[in-house]
């Protein structure tokens, strides 16, 4: 029989072995179970609080040229724009062309410049002028398809998709009859397209790309392109798509399409505010903080085919614009919004914007200035998450705080046609603020309320 002393020694030794075994197990598994950042892309430093502007060269000026557009760059800089997204500049196909001038997304030559807009030197002049003003320029790139008369159809027909009859085919299920699809199972088209994109960065000075229907092109192609472009200089990549997988190795930013879709339904009275919570929940839960999302109220497609910003948002327009800038996301303005453009600009014809001063432009300028200054409103991981502040009108009023060590914003939005007096729950919003637009000092406590007219908003900062 073991003595009491022997038993105690045995138990002590066993406990030591157990501790060592547990520690050893923990150390051996540490690397395997440690979290790994999903986003491997490194955003350019200049993108951390950047604001985009989509420029449709054909409609931007009466002349519709790069040189005429360059003369407007100081105005855009003063407005608060950091990145110019230049719609496709390549020659447009003539075979099966739509309309008189055709779609800029029907590319005839990936290395050429559309003479309608000017020469290559004119384009370089535009880019250089933007750079001198401290702005960047990204080029709209169409990798998914070409025009019917692109020379690649003759020189490399194997680079194209075919239909069941063996004929070249447009993108399936869409009415894009002026283009034919490329086949990215062919290594040759991948090498060609990558080289073409590098050309525009190396030789013309582009700072990145907005990639048309990016989700129709394999992700591994985009991953390779990003590595190649970053070897030239840090670039900014925007994908016309809404998917997390594009953020890992290829794109800085994707579209926030569902944000726009939900806003339309709420403004039309087809849904209540909790529908928008669905977007913000997915954005926070499924997308890493490093994933930029583009929020906007108009672009070339929506303006041409769905309606003007006034048609789409009516009396709620200014409040929707404010949320697109104050909420999480990278705001984008489509050219003409600042002039209160109330026309659906023609897509295949010349239809220049009528420029004039407009309150929408003043609103955007004030919001952009606030975003640049207030670090809580910066993009991705550089800014602060939105934290919901519950209120007593949850179906029609959105309220939230964005706060970091340096800055804080408390914002309230009334998405209804009725004036509301709103009271709030919890303590996150408490404190002394300044109204971002009136400059008035405001103290918020448990007894405070905010009165909002129909379709109005308030932004308090400190």
Image (cartoon, grey):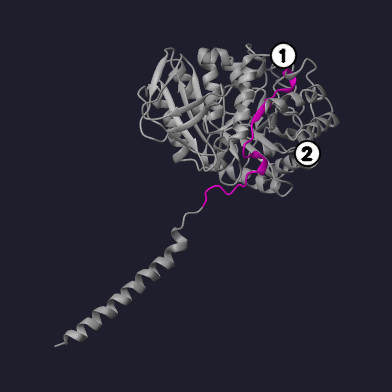
Q: Name the foreground residue: 115 vs 185.
A: 115
Q: Give how far across and how far down residue 252 sits, in percent.
A: 60, 40
Secondary structure beneath disc 2? loop
Q: In the visual, does 148 lie left or right of 452?
A: right
Instruction: Place residue 294 in its image quadrant.
Output: top right
Check if residue 264 falls in the magenta segment.
no
Magenta stretch bounds: 37-59
| Residue drawn at (36%, 74%) of the image | 20
Q: Is residue 375 left or right of residue 393?
A: right
* Residue 148 in view: no
How many labels were placed on the picture? 2
Q: Residue 327 location in percent, x, y?
A: 52, 30
Extreme residue toward the left, this view: 1
On the image, numbered disc 1 is attached to which residue?
A: 355
Q: CA distance from mark 1 to mark 2?
A: 29 Å
Check whether the beta carbons of the residues at disc 1 and disc 2 lie within 8 A of each other.
no
Instruction: Give yes or no for residue 50 being in the magenta stretch.
Output: yes
In which image quadrant can residue 201 be found?
A: top right
Vertical placement of residue 239 versus 353, above or below: below
Q: Nearer the viewer, mark 1 or mark 2?
A: 1
Q: Residues within 10 Å of mark 2 (few under 14, many from 20)?
A: some
Identify whether 291 is placed above or below 399. below
In the rendered image of this protein, does residue 249 appear above or below residue 74?
below
In the rendered structure, the answer to whether residue 20 lies left or right of residue 120 reads left
Residue linked to disc 2: 205
For the point 45% across and 33% down, the residue is: 431
Q: Position of residue 276 (x, y in %)?
A: 44, 27
Few, some or many residues within 10 Å of mark 1 (<14, 14–19, 20+):
some
Q: Position of residue 434 (x, y in %)?
A: 53, 28
């Amino acid at each position: 029989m073991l003595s009491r002393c022997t038993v105690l020694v045995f138990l002590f030794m066993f406990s030591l072995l157990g501790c060592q075994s547990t520690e050893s197990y923990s150390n051996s598994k540490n690397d395997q179970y440690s979290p790994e950042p999903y986003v491997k892309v490194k955003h350019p430093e200049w993108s951390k609080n950047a604001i985009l502007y989509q420029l449709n060269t054909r409609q931007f000026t009466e002349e519709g040229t790069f040189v005429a557009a360059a003369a407007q760059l100081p105005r855009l800089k003063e407005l608060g724009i950091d990145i110019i997204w230049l719609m496709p500049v390549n020659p447009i196909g003539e075979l099966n062309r739509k309309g008189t001038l055709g779609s800029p997304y029907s590319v005839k030559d990936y290395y050429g410049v559309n003479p309608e807009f000017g020469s290559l030197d004119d384009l370089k002049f535009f880019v250089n002028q933007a750079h001198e003003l401290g702005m960047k320029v990204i080029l709209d790139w169409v990798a998914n398809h070409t025009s019917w008369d692109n020379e690649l159809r003759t020189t490399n027909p194997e680079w194209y998709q075919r239909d069941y009859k063996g004929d070249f085919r447009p993108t399936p299920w869409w009415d894009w009859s002026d283009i034919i699809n490329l086949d990215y199972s062919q290594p040759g088209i991948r090498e060609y397209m990558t080289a073409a994109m590098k050309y525009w960065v190396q030789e013309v000075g582009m700072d990145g790309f907005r990639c048309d229907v990016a989700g129709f092109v394999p992700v591994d192609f985009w991953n390779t392109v990003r590595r190649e472009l970053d070897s030239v200089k840090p670039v900014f990549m925007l994908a016309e798509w809404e998917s997390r997988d594009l953020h890992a190795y290829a794109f800085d930013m994707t579209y926030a399409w569902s944000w726009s879709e939900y806003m339309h339904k709420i403004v039309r009275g087809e849904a209540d505010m909790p529908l928008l919570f669905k977007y913000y929940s997915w954005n926070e839960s499924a997308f890493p903080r490093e994933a930029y999302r583009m929020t906007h109220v108009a672009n070339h497609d929506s303006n041409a085919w769905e309606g003007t910003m006034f048609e789409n948002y009516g009396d709620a327009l200014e409040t929707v614009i404010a949320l697109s800038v104050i909420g999480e996301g990278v705001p984008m303005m489509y050219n003409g919004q600042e002039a209160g453009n109330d026309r659906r600009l023609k897509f295949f014809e010349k239809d220049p914007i009528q420029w004039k001063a407009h309150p929408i432009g003043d609103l955007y300028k004030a919001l952009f200035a606030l975003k640049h200054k207030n670090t809580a409103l910066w993009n991705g991981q550089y800014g602060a998450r939105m934290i919901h502040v519950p209120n007593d009108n949850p179906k029609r009023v959105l309220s939230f705080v964005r706060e970091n060590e340096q800055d804080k914003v408390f914002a309230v939005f009334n998405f209804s046609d009725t004036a509301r007096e709103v009271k709030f729950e919890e303590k996150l919003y408490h404190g002394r603020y300044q109204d971002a637009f009136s400059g008035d000092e405001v103290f918020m406590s448990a007894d405070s309320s905010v009165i909002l007219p129909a379709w109005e908003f308030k932004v308090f900062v400190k």
